[in-house]
Image (cartoon, rainbow, N blue to C red):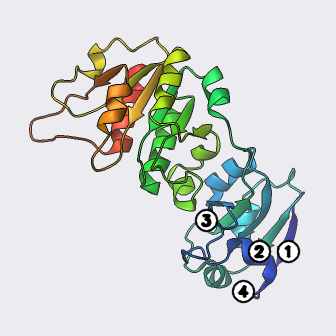
Amino acid sequence: MAKVIEINDPADARLDDFRDLSTADRRPDRPGGRGLVIAEGVVVVERLLASPYPVRGLLGVRRRIEALDLSDLDVPAYVTSAEVMASVVGFHLNRGVLAAADRAPAVSLDALVSTAQRLAVLEGVGDHENLGSIFRNAAALGVDGVVLGPGCSDPLYRRSVRVSMGHVLRVPFATTDEWPAALNMLRHKGFTVAALTPRASAPHLADAGLRGRRVAVLLGSEGPGLTDEAIDAADVAVRIPMSSGVDSLNVATAGAVAFYALL
């Protein structure tokens, strides 16, 4: 059972895991800093508690802490006021509760690929909110894992965790710098690599014959999309047909359409 501890001093060093979340060079979830995983809100905190990430502690107002099942948790749960909490984290937190965890061991690309039937493969997805949305869509629509290629942001950044509703903590992911060679590796493992593009010459997604196959859906950055090198390394380039005057979709939305088409 977690030990519930009341704290009224925002300078208390025991709250350092949650301090300065709005300060870019000091925030505890920076990969180059302490690299902690921060979950916020009851639902996301519950998903963190159920994940393989080792929880270090919780901070929240009493009613939010009491809404959680902490019976199997052997870490401190710090209870404080909304005002003290805002002073610690650097802004008013409407969700009223945070949890901090250490990172779990990274999953290798080989391990991720060995058990997957459907993958999302990302190139240059640098927006944390889009990344979190992609993980949430992946969890909802039967994608077994995410491969992060060059230029992708950190999926365990607090904003990505929040936007994913904690699903970034349950959908396995692996990173690779071997690019676009990693796409050849996926092909050798039996995947069809399907690159999403707005090119008018690409066949419609629904006509590409991808259902029932091991498929890796390749998604590119929010602005320019996939590089020519990535598209050339794919098995097939496909597009989502759209109404006249609309040339593309948000990357997370496009991913959701593609994931659904493969169900």
Q: CA distance from mark 2 to mark 4?
A: 12 Å
Tag 3: residue type? Arg
Quadrant where the N terminus lies?
bottom right
Label of residue 10 in the image: 4
Q: On the image, numbered disc 2 is attached to which residue?
A: 79
Which residue is the site of mark 1?
5
Residue 253 x/y as whole percent: 35, 40
Q: Check contact, mark 4 vs mark 3: CB within 8 A.
A: no
Vertical placement of 160 versus 84: above or below?
above
Tag 2 secondary structure: strand
**Spatial CA span between label 3 and label 1:** 27 Å
Question: Looking at the image, is 68 positioned above or below residue 239?
Answer: below
Structural distance between the alpha carbons of marks 3 and 2 = 25 Å
Q: Nearer the viewer, mark 1 or mark 4?
A: 4
- Callout 3: helix, strand or loop? loop
Instruction: Find residue 117 and report its horizontal and vertical position in percent.
Output: 55, 19
The reply to whether discs 3 and 1 touch (Cβ–Cβ < 8 Å) is no
Tell me which corner region of the image, top left, top right, bottom left or bottom right, holds residue 85: bottom right
Q: Nearer the viewer, residue 162 or 24?
A: 24
Label whose residue precedes the other's in the sequence (2 or 4) = 4
Label 1 close to label 4 by CB (< 8 Å): no
**Amino acid type at mark 4:** Pro
Q: Residues within 10 Å of mark 2 (few under 14, many from 20)?
A: many
The circle on residue 30 is 3
Q: Are the residues flagged by discs 2 and 1 in contact, CB closer than 8 Å?
A: yes
